[in-house]
């Protein structure tokens, strides 16, 4: 059982960083930039709880739980409102991965987008075979895949929903009709992005006649989305996939003036979600379950934990109010290098490309990971080699996907004993920068490798018709091995850094005895098998110097995570739920 160190520590830890400016003035790699840092101390509840990236979306999920709905019911209501109030990150024009626990079993729902039937490995290449630039790949119709989130959620609702489907859309429809106040974050991102305003439909909605973004507090109404959601609420997901909405999407994709795409109404109609086998592995006293391919998250997180299990991370816990020291950062980032090396070589849609050797079991095999851990020495590896897991019988080239980090995450536990962790995305900031029928279209196809082959062979994550692009999304559920109880649900946006963000919270809660809010508020750190990346202005100079002395190339970046988690805590034998939301974004948790 995870025990509570002190709730007061959360305030001390997050309050220590209140001096951060509202907008960092440094080079920004992540499209979805930071707009504020707000202290949060966490939320407690006894019966049920939802945590997500916007208070209006959280309230929608909370209302469903209050009506006696399930975690799935709450997640659907939350996602529909996120489509409206957080359009830069996720929505019905995108896809999602969902880890669900019904009180007895864990399921992995795959709502990842698919490539058009006419797409091939040259989709993101110039005529001479060289890869397109980032902007040329992302912005326009070329990058749009068949959306998956609605059919995935409908499948989950048919299995685990309790409230009527149409009831789950009521909060989003009401907000879309009557309007919601533009948040600081949405306003800041509209100001930052230079591409969404080029789409005439989006420009009219998000900007005034002088192309100024709608100001903070402006009541923004979306009657087009209200109409779309009313139709889906009445007729189910097929209304979206087989009717005029699908035709509208296909027409929008094909009509882009400079970068048309291949997605057709037939591609959309043919989309099907999938139930997959979760990636579950033991870590000390816990069992950690994550998302299988086409996500790389479940495997990579399990690999990092398996590598770190060979070291005593518990002895490296930071003191109250302090940040992790050089030794902890060294071990964590080296474990990340090893996991990302395998990820970049092997991870892809396993419906098209086999994993090496024994598949998932081979990649998370304890003996294999112990061998990988032996590569960690006193000095940093810099760039780690990919491993050769048991039964290795395939060779793949190295991936060159863009992996943009604009996404959202939500977690729910209900009064029926169920819980879930769901990561949902349109991929880049405002996706493909195309708006139709009130929602943003994804640019998910740029999660494929732009190159299709290298000296080591074909690239596993190359574009293929009907294939799902690799992802780093890592919705995660943790159980106590002794009792079998769900003790933590967590996940984050952040592109390829998601794996490090989630692993940080797992180490923070499971090894360092922090509550989930404290672990989320820790500064972000990690390596994607390159530089050691530290969240800027969060680490003392002595720690940075110590890492450099051990051979680390240190890069200070924004690392704008969006972690949300719900944790089972116990005080004096009484269990309760404790929710955490990332201070780097505007999310909250709410429950009774």
Image (cartoon, helix red, strand yellow):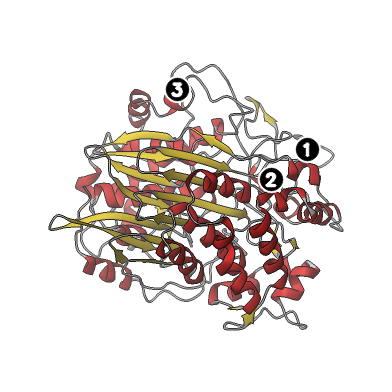
User: The C terminus is located in which quarter?
Assistant: bottom left
Is residue 208 left or right of 50 when viewed as pictured? right
Compared to residue 431, the image places residue 553 above or below, namely above
Is residue 96 left or right of 376 when viewed as pictured? right
Characterize the local packing of mark 3: few (<14), some (14-19) or many (20 or more) Cα atoms within 10 angstroms.
Answer: many
Q: Which callout, 2 or 3, points to the residue nearer the camera?
A: 2
The answer to whether mark 2 and mark 3 are in CB contact below 8 A is no
Is residue 218 left or right of 59 when viewed as pictured? right
Q: Position of residue 371 (x, y in %)?
A: 35, 25
Q: Nearer the viewer, residue 63 or 467?
A: 63
Q: Quadrant of residue 87?
A: bottom right
Residue hosting label 1: 119
Characterize the local packing of mark 2: few (<14), some (14-19) or many (20 or more) Cα atoms within 10 angstroms.
Answer: many
Compared to residue 569, the image places residue 177 above or below, namely below
Mark 2 vs mark 1, CA separation in Å: 10 Å
Residue hosting label 3: 389
Q: Position of residue 290 (x, y in %)?
A: 43, 40
Residue hosting label 2: 445
x 57%, y 44%: residue? 155
Q: Position of residue 540 (x, y in %)?
A: 32, 63
Query: Would residue 87 be seen by someone viewing this image from the given angle?
Result: yes
The answer to whether mark 3 and mark 1 are in CB contact below 8 A is no
């Amino acid at each position: 059982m995870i025990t509570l160190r002190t709730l007061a520590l959360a305030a001390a830890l997050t309050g220590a960083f209140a001096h951060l400016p509202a907008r960092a003035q440094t080079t920004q790699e992540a499209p979805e930039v930071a707009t504020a840092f707000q202290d949060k101390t966490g939320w407690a509840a006894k019966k049920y709880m939802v945590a997500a990236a916007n208070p209006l979306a959280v309230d929608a999920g909370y209302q469903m739980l209050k009506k006696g709905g399930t975690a799935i019911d709450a997640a659907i209501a939350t996602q529909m409102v996120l489509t409206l109030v957080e359009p830069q990150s996720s929505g019905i024009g995108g896809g999602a991965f969902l880890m669900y626990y019904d009180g007895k079993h864990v399921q992995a729902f795959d709502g990842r987008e698919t490539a058009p039937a006419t797409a091939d490995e040259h989709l993101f290449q110039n005529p001479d075979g060289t890869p397109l630039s980032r902007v040329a790949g992302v912005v326009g119709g070329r990058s749009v895949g068949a959306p998956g989130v609605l059919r995935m959620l409908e499948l989950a609702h048919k299995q685990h929903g309790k409230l009527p489907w149409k009831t789950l859309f009521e909060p989003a429809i009401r907000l879309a009709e009557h309007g919601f106040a533009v948040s600081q974050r949405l306003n800041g991102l509209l100001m930052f992005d230079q591409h969404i305003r080029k789409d005439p439909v989006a420009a009219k909605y998000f900007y005034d006649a002088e192309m100024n973004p709608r100001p903070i507090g402006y009541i923004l109404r979306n009657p087009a989305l209200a109409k779309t959601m009313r139709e889906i609420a009445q007729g189910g997901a097929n209304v979206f996939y087989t009717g005029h909405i699908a035709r509208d999407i296909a027409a929008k994709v094909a009509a882009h003036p400079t970068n048309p795409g291949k997605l057709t109404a037939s591609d959309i109609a043919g989309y099907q979600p999938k139930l997959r086998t979760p990636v579950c592995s033991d870590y000390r006293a816990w069992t950690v379950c994550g998302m299988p391919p086409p996500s790389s998250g479940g495997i990579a997180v399990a690999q990092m934990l398996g590598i770190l299990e060979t070291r005593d991370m518990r002895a490296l816990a930071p003191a109250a109010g302090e940040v992790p020291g050089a030794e902890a950062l060294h071990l964590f980032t080296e474990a990340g290098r090893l996991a990302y090396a395998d990820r970049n070589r092997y991870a892809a849609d396993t419906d098209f490309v086999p994993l090496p050797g024994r598949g998932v079991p081979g990649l998370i095999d304890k003996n294999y990971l112990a061998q990988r851990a032996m590569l960690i020495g006193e000095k940093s590896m810099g760039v780690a080699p990919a491993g050769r897991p048991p039964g290795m019988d395939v060779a793949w080239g190295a991936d060159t996907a863009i992996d943009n980090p604009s996404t959202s995450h939500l977690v729910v536990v209900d009064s029926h004993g169920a819980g879930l962790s769901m990561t949902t995305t349109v991929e880049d900031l405002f996706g493909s920068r195309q708006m139709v029928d009130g929602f943003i279209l994804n640019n998910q196809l740029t999660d494929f490798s732009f190159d299709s082959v290298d000296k080591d062979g074909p690239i596993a994550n190359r574009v293929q018709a009907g294939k799902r692009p690799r992802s780093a999304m890592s919705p995660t559920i943790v159980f106590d091995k002794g009792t079998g109880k769900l003790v933590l649900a967590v996940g984050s946006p952040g592109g390829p850094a998601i794996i490090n963000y989630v692993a940080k919270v797992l180490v923070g809660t499971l090894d360092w005895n922090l509550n989930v809010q404290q672990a989320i508020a820790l500064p972000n750190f990690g390596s994607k098998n390159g530089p050691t990346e530290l969240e800027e202005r969060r680490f003392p100079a002595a720690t940075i110097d110590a890492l450099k002395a051990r051979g680390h190339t240190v890069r200070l970046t924004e690392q704008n995570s969006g972690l949300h988690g719900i944790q089972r805590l116990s005080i004096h034998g009484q269990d309760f739920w404790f929710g955490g939301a990332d201070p780097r974004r505007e999310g909250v948790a709410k429950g009774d």
